[in-house]
Image (spheres, helix red, strand yellow):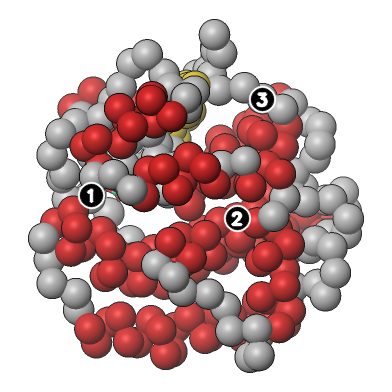
Amino acid sequence: MSTRTVIGSYLSPYVRKLLAVMNLKGLDYRIDPIAGFFGSDAFSELSPLRRIPVLIDDQLTLCDSTVICEYLDERYPQPALLPSSAADRARARWLEEYADTRMGEVFIWQLFYQRAIGPRIFGQTTDEAALQRALEVEIPQVLDYLERQLPAEGFLFGASLMLADIAIAVHFRNAAFLRWQVDAALWPRCAAYVDRVLAQDCLARLRPYEEHMLRVPVTEQRAALAAFGAPLSEETWGGQTPRRGLMKI
Ligand SMILES: N[C@@H](CCC(=O)N[C@@H](CS)C(=O)NCC(=O)O)C(=O)O
């Protein structure tokens, strides 16, 4: 039985980022696949912002995908998640930050929230104006920026997949759940790069679980994943009813 537990759903981009890093480093884990907004009271004790992912291992309980991935990289340095020169490391951290904050804002808090979480979890009607603004203005701005940053071949820092690559690509997987994809005629470099990164084994291995979860309601996902053979934790920090988040974005 693994000494590491990841709390958080396979459908969250930030959980996907952490799981891909653990797969890349060959670290085993058990997962408590709770959806965002579905943590129990006990979950608030572990995650004061009530956000996923959380990692529990033999030494500590830790929140935030970036903090957790950096901790794992320091404890298990191979393969490295950051490039070696100071300038490249700084650029890698910036691109990861851009992915976590700006891409998270437009892909998750606009697109995914308006199309999936708001209506399905909170019974809200879609804010069509916000959705259109995301699709027509905000996402194209992100793609224009990425098109100038991403390489035509390989990954951001050469032949090895690193944390910034994973942090960027995970958001496109959530967009794909909604049948949205990068228009390769407008952003060819970005479209090819996203396909290349998502095809890497550490991310591709998560797809069967993601697809399985998409087919069932949130409250049935744990049981469905157990039947599907996912490496579930014995304990769960999930609740039965959704609660509004503490943070605005
Ligand atoms: N900066 C955090 C962001 C985590 C995050 O926003 N997680 C979402 C799920 S995709 C969540 O837990 N949302 C629930 C909430 O905000 O209450 C990280 O990198 O871990």
Residue 181 placement (x, y as % from top left): 53, 75
Of the numbered discs in the image, which one, if any, rests on residue 167? Answer: 2
Task: Look at the numbered disc 2 and say if its residue's Cβ is closer than 8 Å to ligand 1.
Answer: no
Residue located beneath label 1 in the image: 246
Give the residue type that dot 1 points to: Leu
Marks 3, 2: nearer the viewer: 3
Residue 80 placement (x, y as % from top left): 80, 40
Give the residue type that dot 2 points to: Ala
What separation in Å lies between label 1 and label 3 (alpha carbons)?
31 Å
Q: Evaluate if marks 3 and 2 touch, with contact meaning CB atoms under 8 Å apart.
A: no
Residue drawn where x is 35% and y is 87% of the image: 133
Figure check: 152 above or below 203: below
Residue drawn where x is 88% and y is 55% of the image: 159
- Residue 202 shows in this picture: yes
Q: Earlier in the sequence, mark 1 or mark 2?
A: 2
Classify mark 2: helix, strand or loop: helix
Residue drawn where x is 52% and y is 60% of the image: 173
Quarter of the figure with residue 233:
top left
From the viewer's perspective, is 196 left or right of 4?
A: right
Give the residue type that dot 3 points to: Leu
Residue located beneath label 3 in the image: 27
Classify mark 3: helix, strand or loop: loop
Q: Evaluate if marks 1 and 2 touch, with contact meaning CB atoms under 8 Å apart.
A: no
What separation in Å lies between label 3 and label 2 (alpha carbons)?
18 Å
- Residue 61 shows in this picture: no
Task: Look at the numbered disc 1 and say if its residue's Cβ is closer than 8 Å to ligand 1.
Answer: yes
Taking depth in this image into account, of 127 and 220 the one nearest to the observer is 220
Task: Look at the numbered disc 3 and say if its residue's Cβ is closer than 8 Å to ligand 1.
Answer: no
Circle 2 Cα neighbour tier, 10 Å, few/some/many (<14 / 14–19 / ≥20): many
Figure check: 151 above or below 218: below
